[in-house]
Amino acid sequence: MQTRTPKVPGQDHPITIEPASQRIVVHVGDTVVADTTAALTLREAGYRPVHYIPISDVDQTMLRSSQTSTYCPYKGDASYYSIAGPDGLIEDAIWTYEHPYAAVETIAGHLAFYADRVQITETGEGPDADRQTVHS
């Protein structure tokens, strides 16, 4: 078995995690897969921000375990889910770190969605309540 040494986020590869300030809704067609006001937003180096949604706010009846797995030296081993949508299976549309490294342990119990496979809507709360951003 290969031993992996976790990398720690720092100035050369920053990672921040904070509560999302918006309501996040994930759709497949007209079907809501997730709806939350408790998402975490992870910002990593030069990548686009990613919303990690608590699994309790996801319609788990639509999830199908995948054999796919990947490794991130900053976050650990990721496992994947496909979504059983109204038009068929959307392969590997979700990833999760079930046992993330200590530096990002707050994303445990959360799922992230690929924005090119589902529709992700961010609806502002408070003074920006009319603002809505859609990623698809």
Image (cartoon, helix red, strand yellow):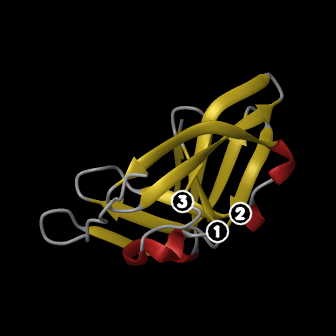
- Give the Cα distance between marks 2 and 1: 6 Å
Type of amino acid under label 1? Gly
Could you tell me which secondary element the residue under label 1 belongs to? loop
- Give the Cα distance between marks 3 and 1: 8 Å
Type of amino acid under label 2? Ile
- Nearer the observer, disc 2 or disc 3? 3
In the rendered view, does 83 fall on the left or right side of 48? right
Q: Quadrant of residue 23?
A: bottom right
Which residue is depicted at the point 79% across and 23% down?
88
Of 120 and 74, nearer the camera is 74
Residue occupied by mark 2: 55
Indicate the position of residue 122 as horizontal and vertical percent values.
Answer: 56, 56
Do labels 2 and 1 touch, CB within 8 Å? yes
Which residue is depicted at the point 81% across and 53% down?
59
Indicate the position of residue 105 as horizontal and vertical percent values.
Answer: 48, 75
Mark carried by residue 97? 3
Which residue is depicted at the point 65% across and 70% down?
37
Q: Specify whether residue 55 is in view.
A: yes
Q: Of the residues under marks 2 and 3, which one precedes in the sequence?
A: 2
Q: Specify whether residue 118 is in view.
A: no
Q: Is residue 33 above or below residue 5?
A: above
Do labels 2 and 3 touch, CB within 8 Å? no
Q: Is residue 97 above or below residue 103?
A: above
Q: Of the residues under marks 2 and 1, which one precedes in the sequence?
A: 2
Residue occupied by mark 1: 109
Label 1 neighbour load within 10 Å: few <14, some 14-19, many 20+: some
Q: Of the residues under marks 3 and 1, which one precedes in the sequence?
A: 3
Q: Quadrant of residue 58?
A: bottom right
Label 3 neighbour load within 10 Å: few <14, some 14-19, many 20+: many
